[in-house]
Amino acid sequence: MSHSRFAIIENEVVVNCIAADDDFVAQFYPGAIEIDDVVPEPCPGWWYKNGQFICPPQPEPEPEEVVDPVA
């Protein structure tokens, strides 16, 4: 039995990704979206809006503190 990968969506947010057969998903997660061919593959925390997966913005890196070696 082959499995596909699915994203579980709640309120337009990916809350989990599972590998399961179609019958299991149809019974327990009827709103899940197959993600086998989605690149890059979405993961929890991504958004799903208007049929598109959207990676949330990455936080800006903190500026490195400059230490004065003379002080």
Image (tube, rainbow, N blue to C red):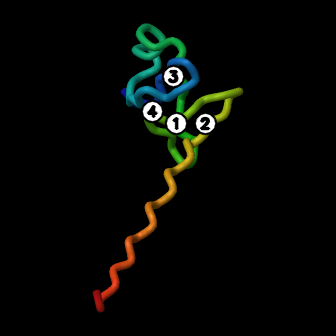
Seen in the image, is 51 located left or right of residue 44? right
Q: Secondary structure at mark 2?
A: strand
Asked if the residues shown at circle 2 and circle 1 are in contact, with their CB atoms under 8 angstroms apart, the answer is yes
Badge 1 density bin: few <14, some 14–19, many ≥20, Cα 10 Å: many
First reached walking from the N terminus: tag 2 or tag 1: 1
Measured in 3D between alpha carbons, the distance from the residue under mark 2 to the one under mark 4, in whole angstroms, is: 14 Å
Look at discs 2 and 1 and give the one toward the viewer. 1
Residue at the spot x=46%, y=19% of the render? 22
Question: Which residue is label 2 attached to?
Answer: 53
Which label is found at residue 5?
A: 4
Measured in 3D between alpha carbons, the distance from the residue under mark 4 to the one under mark 3, in whole angstroms, is: 13 Å
Which label is found at residue 46?
A: 1
User: Furthest residue to the front?
Assistant: 71
Q: Secondary structure at mark 1?
A: loop
Q: Give the amino acid type for the residue marked by disc 1 in the picture.
A: Trp
Q: Give the amino acid type for the residue marked by disc 4 in the picture.
A: Arg
Q: In the depicted view, which residue is nearer to us: 3 or 30? A: 30
Question: Which residue is label 3 attached to?
Answer: 9
Q: Is residue 18 above or below residue 67?
A: above
Residue 43 occupies quadrant: top left
Q: In the depicted view, which residue is nearer to us: 41 or 61? A: 61
